[in-house]
Structures are given as structure tokens and as C-alpha cells.
Amino acid sequence: MKDNNFKKQLDDYIAYFQSLFTFDSRKCREFEDINYITRYGIKVLGVLNNRYQKECMDEQSKSKVNLMVNSLKNQLKIFNFLSVYDALEAILNSLNYLKEHTVHARD
């Protein structure tokens, strides 16, 4: 697997969402919208899953990660977030979970 590309992209997204915690949302209306940030998080998980599916050669790992990503995406869809920061925290938790478990999926 071209592990470095996937890991770098995952790390980049984690850094991006972490940076939004310090972002002044008053300067940018779209980040005030919980639905927007949640949809973006779901999209990011989809992009990462597609990347993993293309780069991973092991069918069992592909299947495991695909199920995991779909579960995380569904959790983001049904969770009722009270604030943008709750949504960001859930997205970061999902990305960190994916990062932690994709390492194990390849073992």
C-alpha cells in the first residue's frame, strides 16, 4: 500500500479540522452552520475511504475500513450537534479513530 499518501492526507485533514477550533467563525458564515461542517466531515471521510480503497491491496482491510468509514459517516449524519465545536470534535474523533484503526487493518 502507498501508505505515505493516505497517512499524509489523513494527517492534513486532521490538522485542518483542528485549526477550525481556533477559527473565528464570525468571519466566515459557512463555519457557523453545523450542517455544513458535518456534511464536509462526511465528504472528507468518503474521500479518505476512496483513497484507502485505491491504495490498499488487501481485500480484508479494504472491507474492514469501508465498513468503519460508513459507520462513522452514519454516526455523523444522525448525531444532533449542539454547536459547531461539538460537530468538529465528532469529526476529529472519527478521523483519529480512522487513523488509529487503519494501521491495525493492514496488520
Image (cartoon, helix red, strand yellow):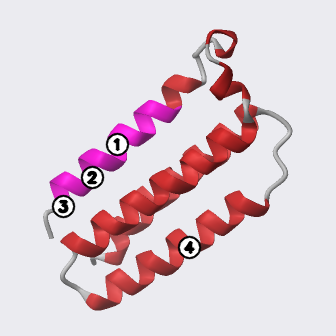
Q: Residue at x 80, y 33 (%)?
A: 83
Q: Amino acid at mark 1?
A: Asp
The residue that disc 2 covers is 7
The span shown in magenta is 3-17
Asked if the stretch drawn in magenta spans residue 98, the answer is: no
List x then y, in percent, for residue 63: 40, 86
Q: Could you say whether the residue bearing mark 4 is in a helix, strand or loop? A: helix
The residue that disc 1 covers is 11
Using the numbered discs, state the Cα–Cα distance from disc 1 to disc 3 in whole angstroms. Answer: 12 Å
Q: Quadrant of residue 53?
A: bottom left
Instruction: Using residue 4 as the reference point, say whether residue 66 is left or right of it.
Output: right
Q: Residue at x 40, y 41 (%)?
A: 13
Using the numbered discs, state the Cα–Cα distance from disc 2 to disc 4 in whole angstroms. Answer: 19 Å
Q: Amino acid at mark 2?
A: Lys
Instruction: Using residue 30 as the reference point, say whether residue 40 is left or right of it.
Output: left
Q: Crowding near pointer 3: few (<14 within 10 Å), some, many (20+)?
A: few
The residue that disc 3 covers is 3
Q: Residue at x 34, y 67 (%)?
A: 50
Q: Amino acid at mark 3?
A: Asp
List x then y, in percent, for residue 60: 33, 90
The residue that disc 4 covers is 70
- Tell me: residue 57, above or below residue 50: below
